Amino acid sequence: MKLTLRIWRQSDREARGKMVTYKIDDISTDMSFLEVLDVLNEQLTATGEEPVAFDHDCREGICGACGMVINGVAHGPQKLTTACQLHMRHFKDGDTIDVEPWRARAFPVVKDLVVDRGAFDRIIQAGGYISAPTGSAPDAHATPVPKPDADAAFEAAACIGCGACVAACPNGSAMLFTAAKVAHLGALPQGQPERASRAAAMLHAHDEADFGGCTNTGECTAVCPKGIPLTVIGAMNHDVLGSAIRGR
Amino acid sequence: MTYPGEFFVDGDPIADTKAPDGPLAERWTKRRSTGRLVNPANRRRLDVIVVGSGLAGGSAAATLGELGYRVRCYCYQDSPRRAHSIAAQGGINAAKNYRNDGDSVERLFHDTIKGGDFRSRESNVYRLAEVSVEIIDQCVAQGVPFAREYGGLLDTRSFGGAQVSRTFYARGQTGQQLLLGAYQALERQVSAGTVAMHTRHEMLDLIVVDGRARGIVVRDLETGAVTVDLADAVVLAGGGYGNVFHLSTNAKGCNVTASWRAHRRGALFANPAFTQIHPTCIPVSGDHQSKLTLMSESLRNDGRVWVPSAAGDTRVPADIPEDERDYFLERRYPAYGNLVPRDIASRATKAVCDDGRGVGPGGRGVYLDFADALTRLGRPTIEERYGNLFEMYERITGDDPYVTPMRIYPAVHYTMGGLWVDYDLSSTIPGLFVIGEANFSDHGANRLGASALMQGLADGYFVLPNTIGAYLADGPFQKLTPKHPDVVSARSAVSDRVQKLLSIDGDRSVDSFHRELGKIMWEYCGMERTDAGLRKAIELIRSLRDEFWTRVKVPGTGAELNQSLERAGRVADFFELAELMCIDALHRSESCGGHFRAESQTPDGEALRADDEFSYVAAWEFASPPVLHKEHLTFEYETPSQRSYS
């Protein structure tokens, strides 16, 4: 395959970026999208140009490091698939592909396709945990968890924290990310003691980090590589309301 | 038969002086109840650095923070949640015996010692089995959503090398869920102010002052700034070094640099040749390949491994009748069948492919077939157990495993070797502790499935926090400033090395060197090793390393986010490690576990140990040539025997 890539280049946080066009040949349909960037970077290195910076690590779709907007869609055209698991058999010879970083006020661009997602860690710090210091746990079978609850918790816990939901949201909201954690922990008996305060504190941290509000457009769940359902946001709103009623 | 003088010299033997004596089952209790402690008020005055934020590093940083130490944790990723533990699929072992199938701490201990082919320490392994039980309790309390049965109790499954069902799991994403549990505990401590988290920072040297580990030199990967961080103790949790093979199931960023820099500063490196080749990975599809993807061992619970009985059979699998298929694991190992340990399954796979019976492009692959399980259990059950793995397979290969068997082949997955530690997880440098995959301690020459998660969390949550106090009770140590000559020299050495890499300005990319190094290692230090091959590899590595330092091209500058520069430093360290791995593999002329020397095999082609000569840990001291220190292994409770799974 021969491809034309138009990629966002920006040298640092302060610099003005721009789209730059590159031609690339000899692309195999078995390659992943990130392997195409590898080939491009080898080509750029050989000609003395700076390679394109992009975050990536496991290349198995689970670490959540990679993330880029491909032809206008977060993680590209394949549903339920991260950029690292997107293979070139879904593209055609001669295609022109636009590649941009996540764009959101709360995710400043660091360089090229790399953005700062530190705000996600700050939301978790605000309450995205169950307080269970090491050594304090009762036997694992002390509290049975109904299978449907365990499955619901797992479904929400599958979030990989990539940030695609934020990139896709017209408001730059991280509500799906935040609510996924609230829903995960809130579905389990172990998560009940902190349930109300957790939701309120995480929502507050979300707003402090400059993410936008949720208007239920649902773009987030459409691009989510793990298929986190929109219903988690409803579950979080329920808990936030509970927090207001209980005054904590 | 060893070769001191040619590639290495013999040094003094070493011993693990920290392990308590007395009955095996009482040693950990004894250690915990007699070790020196640090009172809570004093903990607030002690600084501990943790390098790495995976299962071991993340859980250690969180727990040390809970205890009240002043902790600083470093990772190269943009968030601690991305450490490669996240990619572990299958599960975590624990001797809970919830199944009433005869499991116990003793049996997990026995399975792990035997699985490691009698090249690990009894005291350490027993402790691991003992602590495994607490890990499950801890993770459930944190909200880890393990798989459950309809009655609400935890589900388990079987893994290789065990005849009981003791592996707890969260679909095919157990590592992710356990890591998120540790990550959340860590972020809770960040919020509490006991842990300061430094993301996008890479440790490039260890600072040793007056014989004690006192800090690290780090590079801020975004700005390029090289700074020092000084403390009372340093904990390394940087994971394994499988990426020395270039193609492995490790994440692209996994590297040996933190461990190797500590090795260069005096920490012994143990059993570097002990690497695990995992039998079930998606085969290489072309030269562009940047990494290999594991298909969880749990699939061998329901998948059957086979190849055509006749060489050169190119029919599609559906056209090959039952009686013309060779289910070679079931045939050779009837007692364990498809669930033999990883080293055994990998070698058996290689053997049938060497026979010309491999399938797929290049003949390097075997089938992992779910047809029987789909008939027996139905598609919904298979989807629930392995759905995400089947989807991942289809995304990568374009084939649907519900319809056609998976094709799999072994790939580098885990490294049992690592920095030498004693029972307290202290390296040979006082104040430097090493935990998780980065140490060598518990898996001997082969790790059993679902035991890496167990060991990482055992070290981080329960072992290190209970042993580090004995060292820190002597602290706080003499106050150091960044102007101390040893600190200044470590820092400038790092800056000089960065400048050196940038100044070569040659004509070959870092990746081209890494690929070539990986090919050498896979060819000569992979699944089968020989005397002649290893000698050749050492020669090739040396000459490629010289070429690297004269021809590598690293674009950009040191004062910015420069991913080529990051990789260059890591590959430079892989070159040095690769040579030591080959020397270790050469000197150990026996076969054991994942280390298979063609010269030492049984008539059936199984690994043949030489206990009289090699029942020891090979701990290497950095020098030119390297110095070999042997830690003799004694077995009081287990009797080393030829492993049998048939």
Image: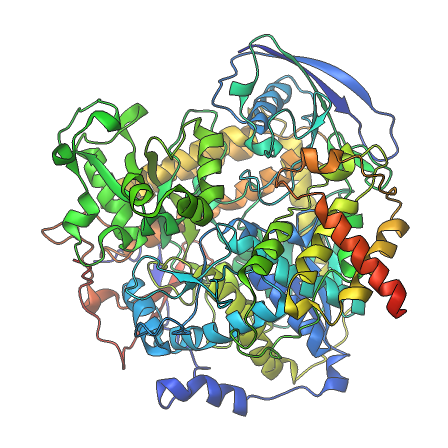
Q: Nearer the viewer, residue B604 or B310?
A: B310
B309 lies above or below B38: above
Q: Position of residue B184 (x, y in %)?
A: 68, 61
Name the residue rendered at 87%, 29% in the picture. A15
Count of numbered circles on the image: 0
B95 relative position to B327: left or right: right
Tell me: B388 left or right of A105: left
**Which of the image's four quarters has the C terminus of chain B?**
bottom left
- Image quarter where the N terminus of chain B lies is bottom left
**Place of residue B600 in the rendered image (x, y in percent of width and height, measured from the top left):** 17, 53
Out of B338 and B571, give the one closest to the viewer: B338
Q: Quadrant of residue A149?
A: bottom right
Please, which residue is most extreme toward the left here?
A: B603
- Give the residue at x 55% y 75%: B462
- The correct choice, above or below, for A127 with respect to A113 in the image is below
B616 left or right of B293 in image: left
Q: Quadrant of residue B309?
A: top left
- Give the image location of residue A151, x and y in percent: 56, 55
